[in-house]
Amino acid sequence: MISEKPVVIKAEHIGKKYIIKHNREASSLPTGKASRIFNALKRQTAEDFWALKDINFEIKQGERVGIIGKNGAGKSTLLKLLSRITEPTEGRIELFGKISAMLEVGTGFNPELTGRENVYLNGAILGMSKTEIASKFDKIVEFSEIGKFIDTPVKRYSSGMYVRLAFAVASHLDPDILIIDEVLAVGDQKFRQKCLDRMNEIAESDKTIICVSHQMNVIRELCGRVMVLQNGELIYDGEPEEGIKLYSGITKQGNPDFFDLGSLTRPAVYSKYPMHLESFEFLNNPARLAGEDPQIRFALVWLSHKNINGIRLRMVIRFNDDSPAGVAVSEALCDTEEGKTYTKIISFDTSCLFPGSYKANLSLFESDSTGTTVYLDYVGEAVFFEVVELKNSKISIHNHSGWGHVRLPGLEVVE
Protein backbone atom coordinates (compact mmCIF):
# COMPACT_ATOMS: atom_id res chain seq x y z
CA MET A 1 0.00 0.00 0.00
CA ILE A 2 1.37 3.41 -1.02
CA SER A 3 1.28 5.89 1.84
CA GLU A 4 -0.06 9.37 1.16
CA LYS A 5 2.54 12.11 1.09
CA PRO A 6 2.54 14.50 4.06
CA VAL A 7 1.24 18.06 4.00
CA VAL A 8 4.14 20.53 4.08
CA ILE A 9 2.14 23.80 3.83
CA LYS A 10 -1.22 24.46 5.45
CA ALA A 11 -2.92 27.87 5.16
CA GLU A 12 -6.10 28.54 7.13
CA HIS A 13 -8.22 31.68 6.64
CA ILE A 14 -5.24 33.81 5.64
CA GLY A 15 -5.81 37.55 5.34
CA LYS A 16 -3.35 40.40 4.85
CA LYS A 17 -4.31 44.02 5.42
CA TYR A 18 -2.34 47.13 4.53
CA ILE A 19 -3.06 50.73 5.47
CA ILE A 20 -3.27 52.94 2.39
CA LYS A 21 -2.74 56.66 2.94
CA HIS A 22 -4.11 59.39 0.68
CA ASN A 23 -3.18 63.06 0.50
CA ARG A 24 -6.09 65.40 1.18
CA GLU A 25 -7.02 67.90 -1.50
CA ALA A 26 -5.23 71.19 -0.94
CA SER A 27 -8.47 73.08 -1.59
CA SER A 28 -10.07 71.42 1.44
CA LEU A 29 -7.44 72.78 3.80
CA PRO A 30 -7.69 76.15 5.58
CA THR A 31 -5.65 78.96 4.06
CA GLY A 32 -3.08 81.21 5.72
CA LYS A 33 0.45 80.60 6.92
CA ALA A 34 -0.51 79.54 10.44
CA SER A 35 -3.17 77.17 9.13
CA ARG A 36 -0.76 75.59 6.67
CA ILE A 37 1.75 74.89 9.44
CA PHE A 38 -0.96 73.59 11.78
CA ASN A 39 -2.37 71.21 9.15
CA ALA A 40 0.97 70.01 7.74
CA LEU A 41 0.60 66.71 9.59
CA LYS A 42 -3.11 66.34 8.83
CA ARG A 43 -3.01 66.25 5.06
CA GLN A 44 -3.44 62.47 4.80
CA THR A 45 -6.38 60.13 5.19
CA ALA A 46 -6.09 56.36 5.48
CA GLU A 47 -8.09 53.32 4.46
CA ASP A 48 -7.78 49.56 4.92
CA PHE A 49 -6.74 47.52 1.90
CA TRP A 50 -7.03 43.74 2.05
CA ALA A 51 -4.41 42.28 -0.30
CA LEU A 52 -5.55 38.76 0.65
CA LYS A 53 -8.89 37.62 2.04
CA ASP A 54 -9.75 34.26 3.64
CA ILE A 55 -7.24 32.08 1.74
CA ASN A 56 -7.32 28.34 2.49
CA PHE A 57 -5.25 25.52 0.97
CA GLU A 58 -2.93 22.59 1.67
CA ILE A 59 0.17 21.61 -0.33
CA LYS A 60 1.75 18.17 -0.04
CA GLN A 61 5.37 17.12 -0.32
CA GLY A 62 6.54 16.93 -3.95
CA GLU A 63 3.69 18.99 -5.40
CA ARG A 64 4.45 21.63 -8.04
CA VAL A 65 1.94 24.44 -7.64
CA GLY A 66 1.57 27.45 -9.93
CA ILE A 67 -0.03 30.67 -8.66
CA ILE A 68 -1.43 32.91 -11.38
CA GLY A 69 -3.54 36.07 -11.56
CA LYS A 70 -3.51 39.63 -12.83
CA ASN A 71 -1.10 42.21 -11.43
CA GLY A 72 -2.40 43.21 -8.00
CA ALA A 73 -4.26 39.93 -7.44
CA GLY A 74 -2.19 39.15 -4.31
CA LYS A 75 0.34 36.62 -5.68
CA SER A 76 3.53 38.25 -4.39
CA THR A 77 1.87 39.04 -1.05
CA LEU A 78 1.02 35.36 -0.62
CA LEU A 79 4.60 34.32 -1.41
CA LYS A 80 5.94 36.79 1.14
CA LEU A 81 3.65 35.29 3.78
CA LEU A 82 4.74 31.75 2.90
CA SER A 83 8.42 32.70 3.00
CA ARG A 84 7.99 34.49 6.38
CA ILE A 85 9.06 37.87 5.02
CA THR A 86 5.87 39.28 6.52
CA GLU A 87 3.13 37.94 8.78
CA PRO A 88 -0.58 37.54 7.99
CA THR A 89 -3.06 39.93 9.56
CA GLU A 90 -5.51 37.07 10.02
CA GLY A 91 -5.30 33.30 9.90
CA ARG A 92 -2.49 30.82 10.28
CA ILE A 93 0.24 29.24 8.10
CA GLU A 94 1.98 26.00 9.06
CA LEU A 95 5.24 25.07 7.29
CA PHE A 96 7.04 21.73 7.63
CA GLY A 97 10.60 21.65 6.32
CA LYS A 98 13.34 24.01 5.19
CA ILE A 99 12.00 26.75 2.92
CA SER A 100 13.87 29.00 0.48
CA ALA A 101 12.47 31.81 -1.66
CA MET A 102 13.69 33.13 -5.00
CA LEU A 103 11.60 36.28 -5.04
CA GLU A 104 14.06 38.76 -6.54
CA VAL A 105 17.06 37.25 -8.28
CA GLY A 106 20.24 39.11 -7.39
CA THR A 107 19.01 40.74 -4.20
CA GLY A 108 22.08 41.42 -2.07
CA PHE A 109 24.62 41.49 -4.91
CA ASN A 110 27.30 44.12 -4.34
CA PRO A 111 28.44 45.70 -7.64
CA GLU A 112 31.89 46.48 -6.24
CA LEU A 113 32.61 42.83 -5.41
CA THR A 114 33.71 40.17 -7.87
CA GLY A 115 31.45 37.39 -9.09
CA ARG A 116 33.25 34.95 -6.79
CA GLU A 117 32.74 37.17 -3.73
CA ASN A 118 29.09 37.72 -4.62
CA VAL A 119 28.47 33.98 -4.88
CA TYR A 120 29.52 33.62 -1.25
CA LEU A 121 27.69 36.79 -0.17
CA ASN A 122 24.44 35.95 -1.96
CA GLY A 123 24.57 32.32 -0.92
CA ALA A 124 24.86 33.38 2.73
CA ILE A 125 21.90 35.76 2.35
CA LEU A 126 19.85 32.89 0.92
CA GLY A 127 20.69 30.67 3.90
CA MET A 128 23.62 28.56 2.70
CA SER A 129 26.64 27.91 4.91
CA LYS A 130 30.17 28.76 3.72
CA THR A 131 30.99 25.04 3.50
CA GLU A 132 27.86 24.36 1.44
CA ILE A 133 28.66 27.24 -0.94
CA ALA A 134 32.25 26.02 -1.37
CA SER A 135 31.07 22.50 -2.19
CA LYS A 136 28.68 23.82 -4.87
CA PHE A 137 30.84 26.66 -6.16
CA ASP A 138 32.11 24.89 -9.29
CA LYS A 139 28.58 23.78 -10.26
CA ILE A 140 27.25 27.32 -9.74
CA VAL A 141 29.94 28.82 -11.99
CA GLU A 142 29.44 26.12 -14.62
CA PHE A 143 25.69 26.73 -14.66
CA SER A 144 26.14 30.50 -14.99
CA GLU A 145 28.48 30.11 -18.01
CA ILE A 146 30.61 33.08 -16.92
CA GLY A 147 33.64 31.25 -15.53
CA LYS A 148 36.13 33.46 -17.37
CA PHE A 149 34.74 36.54 -15.61
CA ILE A 150 34.16 35.11 -12.13
CA ASP A 151 36.92 37.30 -10.61
CA THR A 152 35.71 40.47 -12.34
CA PRO A 153 33.62 43.02 -10.36
CA VAL A 154 29.96 42.46 -11.24
CA LYS A 155 29.50 46.18 -12.00
CA ARG A 156 31.27 45.35 -15.27
CA TYR A 157 28.88 42.49 -16.10
CA SER A 158 26.21 42.77 -18.73
CA SER A 159 22.64 42.42 -17.45
CA GLY A 160 22.54 38.88 -18.88
CA MET A 161 25.72 37.84 -17.06
CA TYR A 162 24.42 39.33 -13.82
CA VAL A 163 21.14 37.43 -14.07
CA ARG A 164 22.83 34.13 -14.99
CA LEU A 165 25.10 34.25 -11.96
CA ALA A 166 22.30 35.31 -9.61
CA PHE A 167 20.01 32.51 -10.76
CA ALA A 168 22.84 29.98 -10.64
CA VAL A 169 23.35 30.75 -6.93
CA ALA A 170 19.65 30.70 -6.09
CA SER A 171 18.93 27.50 -8.00
CA HIS A 172 21.57 25.54 -6.08
CA LEU A 173 19.82 25.89 -2.76
CA ASP A 174 18.76 22.62 -1.18
CA PRO A 175 15.41 23.34 0.53
CA ASP A 176 12.41 21.09 1.14
CA ILE A 177 10.14 23.86 -0.21
CA LEU A 178 11.23 26.23 -2.97
CA ILE A 179 9.27 29.40 -3.75
CA ILE A 180 9.99 31.19 -7.04
CA ASP A 181 8.48 34.43 -8.31
CA GLU A 182 8.91 35.23 -12.04
CA VAL A 183 12.60 34.37 -11.97
CA LEU A 184 12.14 32.07 -14.97
CA ALA A 185 11.33 35.14 -17.08
CA VAL A 186 14.93 36.38 -17.04
CA GLY A 187 17.74 36.04 -19.55
CA ASP A 188 17.65 34.92 -23.16
CA GLN A 189 15.55 32.03 -24.48
CA LYS A 190 18.38 29.50 -24.19
CA PHE A 191 19.05 30.38 -20.56
CA ARG A 192 15.33 30.46 -19.67
CA GLN A 193 15.02 26.89 -20.91
CA LYS A 194 18.08 25.94 -18.89
CA CYS A 195 16.49 27.49 -15.79
CA LEU A 196 13.26 25.61 -16.43
CA ASP A 197 15.16 22.34 -16.82
CA ARG A 198 16.87 23.05 -13.50
CA MET A 199 13.51 23.60 -11.80
CA ASN A 200 12.21 20.31 -13.21
CA GLU A 201 15.36 18.60 -11.92
CA ILE A 202 14.69 19.98 -8.43
CA ALA A 203 11.04 18.92 -8.62
CA GLU A 204 11.96 15.35 -9.57
CA SER A 205 13.85 15.01 -6.28
CA ASP A 206 10.49 15.19 -4.46
CA LYS A 207 10.93 18.81 -3.43
CA THR A 208 7.85 21.04 -3.18
CA ILE A 209 7.81 23.95 -5.62
CA ILE A 210 5.53 27.00 -5.62
CA CYS A 211 5.85 29.14 -8.71
CA VAL A 212 4.37 32.51 -9.71
CA SER A 213 4.61 33.36 -13.40
CA HIS A 214 2.77 35.29 -16.11
CA GLN A 215 4.18 32.87 -18.68
CA MET A 216 1.62 30.12 -19.17
CA ASN A 217 4.10 27.86 -20.96
CA VAL A 218 6.19 27.83 -17.76
CA ILE A 219 3.12 27.00 -15.67
CA ARG A 220 2.15 24.20 -18.07
CA GLU A 221 5.60 22.61 -18.10
CA LEU A 222 6.50 22.99 -14.44
CA CYS A 223 3.25 22.73 -12.49
CA GLY A 224 0.78 19.92 -11.86
CA ARG A 225 -1.64 22.16 -9.99
CA VAL A 226 -2.72 25.78 -10.38
CA MET A 227 -4.24 28.30 -7.99
CA VAL A 228 -5.86 31.43 -9.44
CA LEU A 229 -6.06 34.64 -7.39
CA GLN A 230 -8.38 37.54 -8.17
CA ASN A 231 -8.68 40.69 -6.04
CA GLY A 232 -7.04 38.94 -3.09
CA GLU A 233 -9.31 35.88 -3.19
CA LEU A 234 -8.56 32.29 -4.20
CA ILE A 235 -11.10 31.59 -6.95
CA TYR A 236 -9.70 28.33 -8.36
CA ASP A 237 -7.49 25.47 -7.18
CA GLY A 238 -7.07 22.49 -9.48
CA GLU A 239 -5.95 21.27 -12.90
CA PRO A 240 -3.56 23.63 -14.74
CA GLU A 241 -5.44 23.91 -18.05
CA GLU A 242 -8.74 24.85 -16.42
CA GLY A 243 -6.97 27.41 -14.27
CA ILE A 244 -5.16 28.89 -17.28
CA LYS A 245 -8.44 29.20 -19.19
CA LEU A 246 -10.00 31.01 -16.24
CA TYR A 247 -6.99 33.33 -15.94
CA SER A 248 -7.09 34.09 -19.67
CA GLY A 249 -10.74 35.07 -19.40
CA ILE A 250 -10.00 37.39 -16.48
CA THR A 251 -7.08 39.13 -18.19
CA LYS A 252 -9.05 39.71 -21.38
CA GLN A 253 -12.12 41.11 -19.59
CA GLY A 254 -14.90 38.89 -20.87
CA ASN A 255 -14.65 37.43 -24.36
CA PRO A 256 -11.09 36.01 -24.60
CA ASP A 257 -11.32 35.85 -28.40
CA PHE A 258 -12.19 39.53 -29.05
CA PHE A 259 -9.87 42.54 -28.87
CA ASP A 260 -11.20 46.09 -29.11
CA LEU A 261 -8.47 47.94 -31.00
CA GLY A 262 -10.41 51.14 -31.62
CA SER A 263 -10.07 52.40 -28.05
CA LEU A 264 -6.36 51.59 -27.65
CA THR A 265 -3.95 54.52 -27.44
CA ARG A 266 -1.74 55.12 -30.48
CA PRO A 267 1.67 56.77 -30.43
CA ALA A 268 1.21 60.46 -31.24
CA VAL A 269 2.80 60.03 -34.65
CA TYR A 270 0.01 57.62 -35.71
CA SER A 271 -2.93 59.44 -34.12
CA LYS A 272 -4.02 61.14 -37.34
CA TYR A 273 -3.12 58.43 -39.82
CA PRO A 274 -5.55 57.49 -42.63
CA MET A 275 -6.59 54.05 -41.26
CA HIS A 276 -7.98 53.07 -37.87
CA LEU A 277 -7.88 49.46 -36.67
CA GLU A 278 -11.20 48.72 -34.92
CA SER A 279 -11.16 45.08 -33.76
CA PHE A 280 -9.43 41.70 -33.92
CA GLU A 281 -11.37 38.48 -33.22
CA PHE A 282 -10.13 34.88 -33.12
CA LEU A 283 -12.47 32.57 -35.05
CA ASN A 284 -11.11 29.11 -34.23
CA ASN A 285 -9.61 29.31 -30.75
CA PRO A 286 -11.32 26.20 -29.25
CA ALA A 287 -9.89 23.86 -31.90
CA ARG A 288 -6.53 25.61 -31.96
CA LEU A 289 -6.07 25.57 -28.17
CA ALA A 290 -7.03 21.89 -28.15
CA GLY A 291 -4.05 21.19 -30.39
CA GLU A 292 -6.24 20.26 -33.37
CA ASP A 293 -5.52 23.20 -35.70
CA PRO A 294 -2.17 24.95 -36.33
CA GLN A 295 -3.83 27.96 -37.95
CA ILE A 296 -4.86 31.16 -36.21
CA ARG A 297 -7.87 32.44 -38.13
CA PHE A 298 -9.07 35.90 -37.21
CA ALA A 299 -11.34 38.67 -38.40
CA LEU A 300 -9.72 42.10 -38.70
CA VAL A 301 -11.92 45.20 -38.90
CA TRP A 302 -10.68 48.70 -39.76
CA LEU A 303 -12.03 52.09 -40.82
CA SER A 304 -10.57 53.94 -43.81
CA HIS A 305 -10.22 57.72 -43.88
CA LYS A 306 -8.61 57.80 -47.32
CA ASN A 307 -8.63 56.11 -50.73
CA ILE A 308 -5.58 53.81 -50.75
CA ASN A 309 -4.64 50.91 -53.01
CA GLY A 310 -3.28 47.59 -51.72
CA ILE A 311 -2.92 48.04 -47.98
CA ARG A 312 -1.22 45.23 -46.01
CA LEU A 313 -1.06 43.95 -42.42
CA ARG A 314 2.10 43.40 -40.37
CA MET A 315 2.15 41.42 -37.08
CA VAL A 316 5.30 41.79 -34.96
CA ILE A 317 5.10 38.83 -32.59
CA ARG A 318 6.90 38.66 -29.23
CA PHE A 319 7.00 36.34 -26.26
CA ASN A 320 5.22 37.75 -23.20
CA ASP A 321 8.62 38.68 -21.75
CA ASP A 322 9.23 40.95 -24.79
CA SER A 323 11.84 38.78 -26.49
CA PRO A 324 11.23 38.70 -30.28
CA ALA A 325 9.55 35.71 -31.92
CA GLY A 326 9.01 36.83 -35.51
CA VAL A 327 7.19 39.01 -38.03
CA ALA A 328 4.25 37.98 -40.24
CA VAL A 329 3.19 40.10 -43.22
CA SER A 330 0.09 39.69 -45.39
CA GLU A 331 -0.35 40.11 -49.10
CA ALA A 332 -2.43 43.09 -50.24
CA LEU A 333 -5.74 43.01 -48.36
CA CYS A 334 -7.81 45.32 -50.56
CA ASP A 335 -8.17 48.84 -51.97
CA THR A 336 -10.01 51.18 -49.64
CA GLU A 337 -12.34 54.14 -49.97
CA GLU A 338 -12.72 57.06 -47.60
CA GLY A 339 -15.38 56.61 -44.92
CA LYS A 340 -15.88 52.84 -45.35
CA THR A 341 -15.35 50.02 -42.83
CA TYR A 342 -13.65 46.81 -43.98
CA THR A 343 -13.51 43.26 -42.60
CA LYS A 344 -11.04 40.61 -43.70
CA ILE A 345 -10.61 37.01 -42.54
CA ILE A 346 -6.89 36.27 -42.21
CA SER A 347 -4.99 33.08 -41.37
CA PHE A 348 -1.58 32.56 -39.77
CA ASP A 349 0.20 29.21 -39.30
CA THR A 350 1.57 28.91 -35.75
CA SER A 351 3.61 25.77 -36.47
CA CYS A 352 6.75 27.94 -36.59
CA LEU A 353 6.25 29.09 -32.98
CA PHE A 354 7.16 27.36 -29.75
CA PRO A 355 4.32 26.46 -27.40
CA GLY A 356 3.85 29.41 -25.05
CA SER A 357 2.32 32.85 -24.51
CA TYR A 358 2.66 35.59 -27.12
CA LYS A 359 1.61 39.14 -27.87
CA ALA A 360 1.56 41.02 -31.17
CA ASN A 361 1.83 44.58 -32.41
CA LEU A 362 -0.42 45.27 -35.41
CA SER A 363 0.09 47.77 -38.20
CA LEU A 364 -1.54 48.56 -41.52
CA PHE A 365 0.86 49.84 -44.18
CA GLU A 366 1.44 50.39 -47.87
CA SER A 367 4.55 50.57 -50.00
CA ASP A 368 5.06 53.68 -52.12
CA SER A 369 6.50 53.75 -55.65
CA THR A 370 10.05 53.48 -54.30
CA GLY A 371 9.23 50.45 -52.13
CA THR A 372 9.37 52.46 -48.90
CA THR A 373 6.95 51.36 -46.15
CA VAL A 374 4.31 53.95 -45.24
CA TYR A 375 2.46 53.20 -42.02
CA LEU A 376 -1.30 53.78 -41.99
CA ASP A 377 -2.10 52.76 -38.41
CA TYR A 378 -0.21 51.07 -35.57
CA VAL A 379 -1.29 49.49 -32.24
CA GLY A 380 1.30 48.17 -29.79
CA GLU A 381 0.56 45.04 -27.69
CA ALA A 382 -2.79 44.76 -29.43
CA VAL A 383 -3.36 41.00 -29.28
CA PHE A 384 -2.44 38.22 -26.82
CA PHE A 385 -2.59 34.52 -27.66
CA GLU A 386 -1.40 31.06 -26.70
CA VAL A 387 0.33 28.47 -28.88
CA VAL A 388 -0.03 24.81 -27.87
CA GLU A 389 1.71 21.72 -29.19
CA LEU A 390 -0.32 20.03 -31.91
CA LYS A 391 -1.70 16.56 -31.28
CA ASN A 392 0.37 13.95 -33.17
CA SER A 393 2.85 16.69 -34.07
CA LYS A 394 5.86 15.75 -36.17
CA ILE A 395 7.63 19.00 -35.34
CA SER A 396 10.79 18.81 -33.25
CA ILE A 397 12.53 21.54 -31.28
CA HIS A 398 16.23 22.17 -31.76
CA ASN A 399 18.37 24.38 -29.55
CA HIS A 400 21.81 25.57 -30.62
CA SER A 401 23.79 28.17 -28.66
CA GLY A 402 25.05 29.83 -31.83
CA TRP A 403 21.80 30.46 -33.68
CA GLY A 404 19.01 30.09 -31.18
CA HIS A 405 15.90 27.94 -31.36
CA VAL A 406 14.11 26.62 -34.41
CA ARG A 407 11.24 24.22 -34.99
CA LEU A 408 12.01 21.63 -37.63
CA PRO A 409 9.84 19.03 -39.40
CA GLY A 410 10.26 15.52 -38.03
CA LEU A 411 12.37 13.04 -39.99
CA GLU A 412 10.34 10.47 -41.90
CA VAL A 413 11.69 7.12 -43.07
CA VAL A 414 10.92 6.80 -46.80
CA GLU A 415 12.27 3.29 -47.42
Image: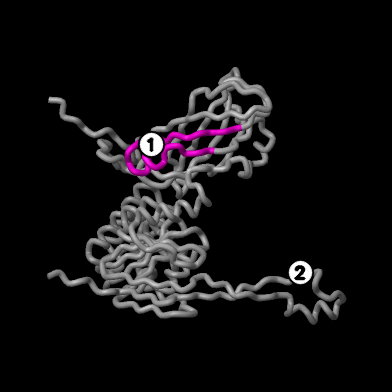
Q: State which quadrant residue 290 falls in.
A: top left
x, y percentage for residue 135?
A: 24, 68
Question: Depth check: 94 or 284 in front?
Answer: 284
Q: Name the residue under label 2.
A: 25
Residue 306: x %, y % from top left: 67, 25
Q: Which residue is pictured at 54% across the width and 43% down the height?
A: 259
Q: What stretch is highlighted in magenta?
A: 280-302
Instruction: In the rendered structure, find residue 238 and report the number of the disc placed on it.
Output: none
Q: Callout 1, which amino acid?
A: Thr
Q: Which amino acid does label 2 sit on?
A: Glu
Q: Does residue 351 show up magenta in the picture?
A: no
Residue found farthest to the right: 32
State which quarter of the image contains the C terminus: top left
Seen in the picture, residue 408 relative to 239 is either above or below; the reply is: above
Q: Relative to 124, is 235 above or below?
A: above
Residue at x 46%, y 78% (from the top left corner): 88
The image quadrant where one finds the N terminus is bottom left
Of 224 and 161, nearer the camera is 224
Query: Left or right of 59: which side holds 56?
Result: right
Under circle 2, the secondary element is loop
- From the image, tell me which residue sits under label 1: 350
